Image: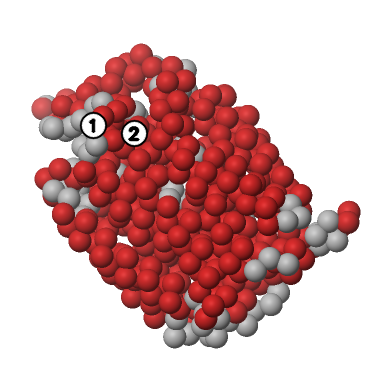
Amino acid sequence: MPIANAAPATSVADPVTTLYHKVTWKLIPFLCFCYLAAYLDRINIGFAKLQMLDQLHFSETAFGLGAGLFFVGYILFEVPSNLVLERVGAKIWIARIMITWGLLSACTMLVTSTTQFYILRFLLGAAEAGFLPGVLYYLTTWFPTHRRGRIIALFMIGLPLSSVIGGPLSGWIMGHFDTVGGLRGWQWLFLIEAVPSVLLGVLTFWALPNTFQQAKWLSQDEKALLESELRKDEADATGSKHSFRDGFFNLKVWMLGGIDFSILLSAYAMGFWMPTFIRNAGVTDTFHIGVLTALPSVAALLGMLLIGASSDKHRERRWHIIVPFFIGAAAMATSTFFTHNVAATVALFAIASAAIIGAVPVFFSLPATFLKGTAAATGFALACSVANIAGLVSNSLMGVAIDVTGSSAGALWFFAGCLILSSFLVIALPAKLVNR
């Protein structure tokens, strides 16, 4: 009978989807932990500040300048670092970045003056330069454009996770290790939290293949399929640019830098100063401050996943950035009316974090839609370099605002305004070019 001979219906997984699931699990968890360690070493200064300023007699302005000088080193060495990565390979260069920044972060425990603080923050920025744009460029050599929104979101989960884990951990270290071995809690904080960066840097030599052709865990057929998908994606990218000159002198890259600048003004204000906001709202215990600091980061994590998935599903980028910008700006500005209310402060910064940081993976999927090869490496690094001027501006402005007016309100309103203005830069990006 025909029915008897009929084969049962089966559901066969798409080989391309299966392959990218495999690649994702091999690369993203490790890179996510690396980013977690990087960002933790960058922002733990915000927790150390709660003890550091009193012991070393630093002003808010001096702290803000020191926190911001990190980004001067970061900016100066960003593009050169990414060009070196393209030449020597991801494995060696990312490992170098992580080991050196871990060691320099640990050295911060030894500072006794503002001059030493400024020098170490500058060197830490120079050491970390190239990590984020380097990883983003590295991912473009594995994943086609239409998959990058979700993939970058998964990688960048490390950013909010660094606060989710680092907030309570930092508060606990400072509370329980204070005066142990003759060291203050903030000194133990820098020492302990530097260890993961150094260890992960060493592991990078084994965990990351330089290219998919060198991946021992891919078969020859899988490598051929991966290459086919990437070639197809490159063929679809009509008008894409490839050279260093194309990346450096591309107006759209500078526009992206301006957009990212506004993102980072707000993100760094929340990342570096959230412990201060919560303490000013009335919380004094360092562990409790750490726990409450983690809540906006949980919201940011959810925002990243939801906004990134929605952007990929609809293959739409611009409005997935603009709408979160307006929501985040409104929440951040509103928070200035509730500075002495703990619940309102945490809730409003949670909304701001979910919106602003949630849009970051979508934003970082944009450069590779019109840049390839050396232009992509240069473009990623240049956009990040321009944007990271925000680290110096944000931290310095916050410190001066608090010292001069006794409040961070003026700075936060300025950051909110920058988000609104940068929305017009997003609108100016051609939809046909970026919505892929």
Is 222 drawn above or below residue 330 in the view shown? above
Whether tag 2 and tag 1 are in contact, CB under 8 A, the answer is yes
Using residue 35 as the reference point, say whether residue 211 is left or right of it: left
Amino acid at circle 1: Asp
| Mark 2 crowd level (few <14, some 14–19, many ≥20, 10 Å Cα) | many
Please give the name of the residue rendered at 21% of the width and 43% of the height, measured from the top-left corner: 251
Q: What numbered label is drawn on residue 126? A: none
* Colour scheme of the rendered structure: secondary structure
x then y, percent, for residue 147? 28, 40
Q: Which residue sits at x=43%, y=17%? A: 214
Q: Is residue 397 above or below residue 194?
A: below
Q: Position of residue 10 (x, y in %)?
A: 25, 34
Q: Residues within 10 Å of mark 1 (few under 14, many from 20)?
A: some
Question: Foreground residue, 181 or 348?
Answer: 181
- Quarter of the image that includes the C terminus: top left
Residue 171 seen = no
Quadrant of the rendered image containing residue 138? top left
Q: CA distance from mark 2 to mark 1?
A: 9 Å
User: Which sits earlier in the primary sequence, circle 2 or circle 1?
Assistant: 1
Q: Give percent across and percent down for residue 361.
A: 35, 50
Q: Which residue is mark 1?
A: 246
The vertical placement of 157 against 298, above or below, is: above
**Mark 2 is on which residue type?**
Thr
Mark 2 = which residue? Answer: 378
